[in-house]
Image: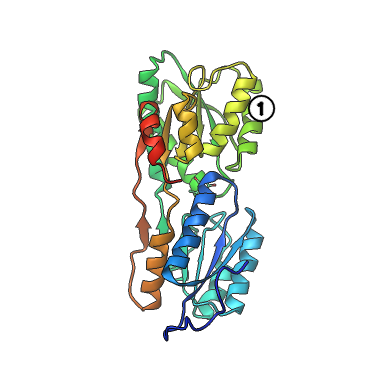
Amino acid sequence: EDEGGSNGSSGGGSKKITLGFSQVGSESGWRSANTDSIKSAAKEAGYNLKFSDAQQKQENQISAIRSYIAQKVDVIAFSPVVVTGWDAVLKEAKAAKIPVILTDRSVETKDESLFVTLVGSDFTDEGRRAAKILEKVLEKAGHKGKVKIAQLEGTTGAAPAIERAKGFKEIMDAEHKDDWEIVVTQTGDFTRAGGKQVMAAFLQSNPDINVLYAHNDDMAIGAIQSIEAAGKKPGKDILIVSVDGVKDGFVAMSEGKINAIVECNPLLGPQLMEVVQTVKDGGTVERWIKTKESDFMQDQAKDALPTRKY
Ligand code: GYE
């Protein structure tokens, strides 16, 4: 898919920047909002955007990046589906002198020169925030006794899945060792269908679950269907905390089905385009450009809903 005009003059004299962007997929509401933000910000900035959707497959992202190198784009940006396995293709970009910017998700590499910066959220902190907000949710619900947590993880090997689990566990181990336990944890691939299916299996194997921690709203929404199908009340019998803050998450929260949401902002387009310009101009940027976010409890959902932008 090619979102821009021809690779070359903008008609205004200076050469139009061509940006090759490889997106993870279209697995969630967060991702759709992120894609829209990137496309509209590129248009706004007057860049020629080459955009491709990898359908959550690393091999598709690697071939997209290779094709951007072959097309000699000015800058490559991508949101890496998983953290490992990028060194070879990033070295090819470096050899072709094409700067690479990571957005949303990070990579693991020993060679820090293979990318310029990461524009995205602190997922470990989101995990910590999820645990802290669960404390409030439990208190509000007047919960007594053991907290038996089911965790729906994001895509296996993806930075947000690894780090949201890690941050949550950090708080749990430090502050709730005696009363909280993750009784079951599995990936739902960040999708509604995944959340629904895995939650149905969780309820079969562990009917005593009383909390769900979902790494994104879409999986929580899928899980809610399975909880209801099992004759239980989401938000009451099973308290739910999720991450993202997409519109449908807020709707579920305003219906009392999700208890709290840790926001993760997908509107990274404008910041990304600024960084692209700075990098093209030879300027320096921070290694990690973090996104600002908030937390929301159920009683804030109705008021916040009309102002949600994604
Ligand atoms: O939370 C999830 C999406 O990488 C932060 O990916 C992103 C995550 C987001 O599928 O909904």
Residue 43 spot, x, y in % from top left: 47, 67
- Quadrant where the N terminus sits is bottom right
Q: Which residue occupies the extreme bottom position in the image?
A: 13
Residue matched to label 1:
201
Q: Residue at x 59, y 23 (%)?
A: 227
Of residue 50 and residue 100, the one placed in the foreground of this image is: 50
- How many dots with numbers? 1
- Position of residue 242 relative to residue 180, above or below, is below
Q: Is the CB of mark 1 within 8 Å of ligand 1?
A: no
Nearest to the observer: residue 76 or residue 84: 76
Rendered residue at 55%/38% (across/down)? 218
Q: Which residue: 53% across, 80% down?
A: 95
- In the image, residue 304 lies at what x, y percent? 37, 35
Task: Answer left or right for 259 relative to 64.
Answer: left
Nearest the eye: 147 or 213: 213
Residue 104 appearing in the image? yes
- Disc 1 secondary structure class: helix
Q: Residue type at mark 1: give it.
A: Ala
Q: Quadrant of residue 250?
A: top left
